[in-house]
Image: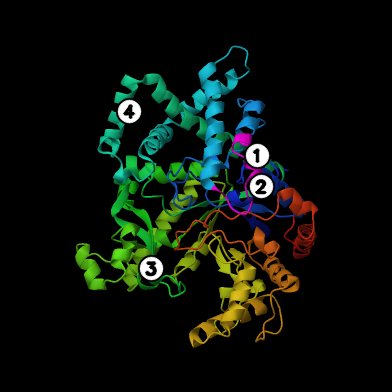
Amino acid sequence: MSETLSAARRAGVLCPVFALRTGEDLGIGDTEAVRGLIDWAAETGLGFVQFLPINATGRDNSPYNAISSVALEPLTLDVSPAAVPELAPEEFTGVCARHRVASWPGEVVDYPAVRALKSELLDLAHGRLVGGRMAGDGLDDRRAALAAFRVAEAEWLDEFCLFSVLMERAGGEDWPNWPEEFNTAEKAWAWLEAERAARPEAVEQELSRVAYAQWLCAGQWEAVRAHAAARGVAMMGDVPFGVSWCSADVFFHPEEFDLDWCGGAPPERYFKDDPFVRKWGQNWGIPLYDWDRMAAGGFRWWGRRLRKLTAVFSIFRIDHVLGFYRIYGFPWRPVANDDFLPLSGEEAAARCGGRRPQFLRHDDATAENRAANLGQGDRLLRLVLEAAPGAEVVAEDLGTVPEYVRPHLASLDIPGFRICQWEDDGHGHAVQGAAYPECSFATFGTHDHEPLRTLWERLRGEVEAEDEATREAAARQLKFLCQFGWLHPELGPYPPLDDGIRRALLAALFHSRSRFAAFTLPDLFGAEIRFNVPGVAADHNWSARLPMTLAEMQAESPWREECAWLAAVLRESGRAPT
């Protein structure tokens, strides 16, 4: 089946690559696991599979803090000899045995161990491809392909290769604290020139090794895209609003960014255990854009970013689309959050030259400001659509949403999010799925939210809380969930989440009118697996893995029965391909 995009109602599943498991993976999900998920989706009747960003990450492993807007994350690679022919099977087996892969626990990703293992395997494979050059080894075509890739992608690849080499030298991507000899782009190029003069072969090997990994990433992900198209499943990606401050983009092109501000979100009382977020908001630490400078350059940076994204994904979600209209900015980086927590607004402004956290360029306090923000959002989003012809665009429009955003997104045919338990009809009742706009993306939560079971049980506990506001908020969400899923009783007492309740909620999601209806894979099985807790820098973020392999999911109880139920309800709801 060819890959065709339409406005037909489709269902999809969200699962980060790292969480997928196969019987042969090396402690983290990879492109081979993604193929398995696509095959399962096709056989079940799902129309798309949704992933988090797959760009190269720093040592915090956050997909939303990428160190490159273009380079891909090598940890997603399948580095088996079947996928990397320059890697000898006996070398692969020996390295895996030495790293004791078989004894690793499967519940979470051990990033240091996985990184060490895959780096050693890639070093061996790269050494054989570019080092030995043995006659008759059958790798000449691959050598030529790697060389052609380096030429074709030189605009960004040369910078990323140098950045990666310097990261190894400095012990991390925090370039503002790198040694003086290479802590700016100008110094870095001079350093490279000196290194090439002193030890040309060695430094070329280091640069080539980075390029080799990116070549493998590009090839494997484009092959996955082709496999998905052949199975009639769309690949859905994610484009974060920003990139890491400590990225190759900011290091080599600081002029494209407004480094006086860090992007984030305004204060939210929802974060009860985070006093900084409750008082000041979320400080993500991403640098803001110099939109005027980018416009003067024809938005070349954004164009390249989106072209690379759509080489893999036929649908993509714009994370924090509100930032295109106006972004909440902090005049300090997150490392200083603790220093600012006890300060008043006036004290914070005094430390920052009169600046304090605020919406940029304008807040929405006046009609003039709202019109200016809407105008900016319209200009930038039209640019996104023009840069990604043929792709479908979805907008994550959650948070403090101005009243002009949803109508504007609809006018551009960009579906916004509908979180089912939050949709109020204006009279204190849940909006039923049949009343959702067709141009929408319905779900119970994103990668940042609690799993459905965890949410339900937390709300059940909070309806008994001493605090009246907590009780009322919990009762409201439980009532909305029950109304959305046609569950009774709507006013309690609420039973524990069982298979019947879970299936009723998912079925209501699929029967909604929304163009897209998506669930997280753990929610299909009632698993309490959470991929990220926003605002919390914790080791458990971005590391949770599924409790079963993809093969076990399809063949063993109780997962097999849920997969069969899913296939049936997708047909019943009209979301399965006909």
Q: Which residue is mark 3?
A: 281
Q: Amino acid at mark 2?
A: Thr
> Residue 103 magenta-drawn?
yes
Quick one: label 1, few (<14), some, or many (20+) residues within 10 Å? Answer: some
In space, the residues marked 3 and 2 are separated at their CA atoms by 41 Å
Quadrant including the N terminus: top right
Q: Secondary structure at mark 3?
A: loop
In space, the residues marked 4 and 2 are separated at their CA atoms by 46 Å
- Magenta segment, which residues? 96-110
Q: Which residue is mark 2?
A: 4
Q: Amino acid at mark 3?
A: Gly
Of badges 4 and 2, the one in the foreground is 4
Q: Amino acid at mark 4?
A: Leu
**Residue 310 horizontal side relative to residue 333, left or right:** right
In space, the residues marked 3 and 4 are separated at their CA atoms by 41 Å
Q: Which tag, 3 or 2, sits closer to the chain's start?
A: 2
Q: Which residue is mark 4?
A: 192
Q: Is residue 532 above or below residue 347?
A: above
Q: Are marks 3 and 2 in contact (CB under 8 Å)?
A: no
Residue depicted at x 42% and y 46% = 302
Residue depicted at x 66% and y 67% = 513
In space, the residues marked 3 and 1 are separated at their CA atoms by 41 Å
Q: Which residue is mark 1?
A: 226
Q: Which tag, 2 or 1, sits closer to the chain's start?
A: 2
Q: Which tag, 1 or 4, sits closer to the chain's start?
A: 4
Q: Amino acid at mark 1?
A: Ala
